[in-house]
Amino acid sequence: MCDNIVACTVKTPVALQIGDVKTDTARPGVFVIDVTFPHSVNLQEISFKNYYTAFVMVRLQKVDPESPESAAQWVTCLRNRCLMPSPHTEEGSQDYFSIYRQQMLMEPDNVTSIRLILRQPSSVWLNFFLEDIKITECGTENSEKNIPSWFSNLTPEEQPMNLQAGLPDPEKVSSSIQQMWALTEVMQTNQTSARVGRFDVDGCYDINLLSYT
Amino acid sequence: MANSLQPGVGGATDSRSSKPDTESEFLTQVGAGAVLRGALLKLLEIRSEDPIGFLAEHFQNLAQSLENGDSGCAVEGGNKKQHQQALQEFEEQKQHSRALWHLTQAHHSQRSAFNNNVAVAFSLLSRDDRKRKPGLKGRVYTELLRRVCRDRGVAEPVSAPLIKKLRCQDHEAVPFDLFRHGVLACFVFADFVRKSRSLFETVSQSDRSLCRAVLGSLRDALETTGCSHPARYLEASAKLTPGRLAQAMDRAQTLASGTPSTLMSQEEFIEEASALIISRVKLVS
């Protein structure tokens, strides 16, 4: 499980509109949100809260790790994901959504920025955008937690061991030893705090010793 | 009409109360229901493999205890002091045997049944008919521990170090917790000795260093100090897999191949194995 939320910068939504934004009375139907990362990441999940956005398209800017000088490429990883089944009605308008790695068209590795293209064809809603955008990174293969070395011994591989002849049967020996170990553990855990009330120190009733206790 | 019926009914009930004709009334009078219920409950608790034998012994013990209850009050007029003393010792022996029988009814792994039996045995041994000083005496306790070890096939020299740690002085009064701890320790130790005997059968023909290597893996597993309790068990069990033990034995045999081989005797093996378990028993204080 990788739960590493990556720090990213979410830019303000930019409306895509034909004509002048300020003078035109018609409201925009397309917004673009850019999310940039300080370093290239391997995405696991993009989660956000919807606010009246009907469709979203996700594009990724990927950097080729082998040749860092080459230009970053834009690829579409999610085409027209429907967030509201009916754009005029409320359904799905304020829901939380997650887009997982497995749902994407391309492998979201070595990504430097994400472009979310929001569309709302209905004129019913005054504003629409996405809130609370969180990007989760894929966890590394080697976990930080230290796994003890004996973990690998729990399910041993079936290797043919070159053992000498004349050794006692390891299975029988192992089962006896394990039972003896279990009995010793029982003995160890069976401790009682009850005392008989002796006053001697190491079996000796010497008055000098007694005065020190 | 009503008046004429009533005397008839009254007469019938009178005849029924004097002689119990119905079967349920007879059983209630005799008290057989309670006795049988007790016996079945005990059988369910113990779940012994020989139910008929167990029930036979149970009823025998019950009969004996009833007999003792009756005869305990009637003591012979004290003209023969030795006779009384011998009788007292005989009674003590019988009590010890009965307590021991109770203790052997459930294996120590059946914890709740075993605890119940220990409680019964403790109350049996603490009871004193003369009512001088109730309570379990150290002498009786130590003697019982010795008998438990002996009856389960542990020789005296083997059990001596354990008894030395668990024993109480003759005059000391033993509390119940200590009694339970000591008895459980003896039963566990007896099982341990039996297991080490069977282990010796498997490794008996091998070199002394191989036997030592096997015991060394046990010591290693016991000394596992790990993070948390469950992880400790996993780690110790990982050290005792057949693969690991085979490797340890193989290594020991390779190392010993140059030197002339010496065999280990059974006593020596059991002594070394017992040392591992006895070192983990706390001294009674």
Image (spheres, grey):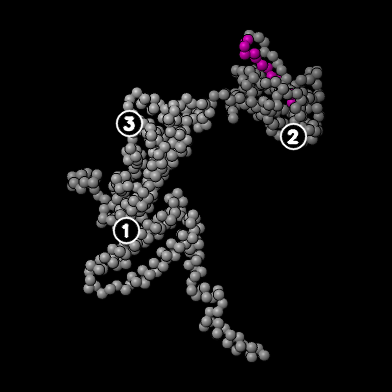
Upstream in sequence: badge 1 or badge 3: 1
Q: Position of residue A143 (x, y in %)?
A: 54, 26
Could you tell me how far apart the alpha carbons at marks 3 and 2 are, in whole angstroms?
83 Å
Query: Identity of the amino acid at label 2?
Result: Gly
Residue A192, label in figure: none
Residue pictured at 37% horizontal, 44% vertical: B193
Q: Which chain letter matches label 1?
A: B
Cβ–Cβ under 8 Å for marks 2 and 1: no
- From this view, report whether residue B230 is shown above or below residue A120: below
Q: Give the range drawn in magenta.
A: A56-68
Residue A92, numbered circle:
2
Q: Give, as a three-letter code, the residue at label 1.
A: Leu
Disc number placed over residue B136 in the picture, else none: 1
- Specify whether residue A64 is painted magenta: yes
Residue B33, x across and y down, in percent: 51, 69
The residue beneath circle 3 is B262
Residue at 18% in and 45% down: A208
Camera-nearest residue between B29 and A40: B29
Q: In which quarter of the image is the N terminus of chain A?
A: top right
Above-or-below relation of A71 to B83:
above
User: Which quarter of the figure has residue B118?
Assistant: bottom left
Q: Residue A164 at x, y = what percent?
A: 44, 26
How many neighbours does mark 2 have within 10 angstroms: few (below 14), some (14-19), or many (20 or more)? some
Q: Is disc 1 in the same subunit as disc 3?
A: yes
Q: How many angstroms separate mark 2 from mark 1 (CA)?
A: 77 Å
Note whether residue B186 is visible. no
Callout 3 crowding tier (Cα within 10 Å): few <14, some 14–19, many ≥20: few
Label 1 residue SS: strand
Asked which secondary structure carries label 2, the reply is: loop
Name the image quarter holding residue A99.
top right
Which is closer to the viewer, label 3 or label 2? 3
